[in-house]
Image: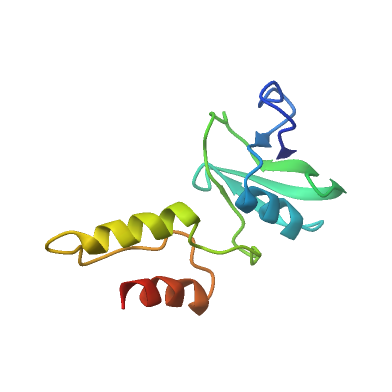
Amino acid sequence: FGICKDDNDLIRPGRITMKPTIEQLALVKACQVGTTLLLEDGIMEVKVTEKVSATELKVVITRGGKLKARKGVNVPDVEIDCAALTEKDIEDAEYLLQLDPPIEYICVSFAQKGQDLQELIDIMD
């Protein structure tokens, strides 16, 4: 389980890879031996058995299934060290707030702490 090295380093039997984004790198960095990762909305579950490097983990499948491409990874017991809002999220929020009438609700998908919500509240004020 890890960050893909290039476009040819795709998911294949025995290997799960993610694109090298700030968020994905922070996710792998935050994982330790024993960390549980939920794949595809929790349908599948793996547990970290070894931290091979800053970009790769060895995992054991604790609840399997057929993993499809571009599915989410959730780490419920770990705080990921990155902002909940990406630069694009901020640009989108600023655009939506300029509409006439402005949008009334904006949701934050991966809030982990109050500061994640405060960042959006500051944009909206």
Q: Residue at x 54, y 69 (%)?
A: 112
Q: Position of residue 34 (x, y in %)?
A: 78, 57
Name the side, left or right, on which 64 lies relative to 108.
Answer: right
Q: Residue at x 44, y 77 (%)?
A: 118
Of the 4 image quadrants, the one containing the N terminus is top right
| Snapshot quadrant of residue 6 | top right
**Residue situated furthest left in the rendering:** 101
| Snapshot quadrant of residue 122 | bottom left
Q: Nearer the viewer, residue 120 or 29?
A: 120
Of the 4 image quadrants, the one containing the C terminus is bottom left
Name the side, left or right, on which 44 lies relative to 104.
Answer: right
Q: Nearer the viewer, residue 69 or 34?
A: 69
Q: Position of residue 32 (x, y in %)?
A: 79, 58
Q: Residue at x 53, y 75 (%)?
A: 113
Q: Position of residue 123 (x, y in %)?
A: 37, 72
* 76 in relation to 43, above or below: below
User: How many numbered discs sit on the rendered protein?
Assistant: 0
Please say which color scheme the image uses. rainbow
Q: Residue at x 53, y 48 (%)?
A: 42
Q: Position of residue 98 (x, y in %)?
A: 22, 62
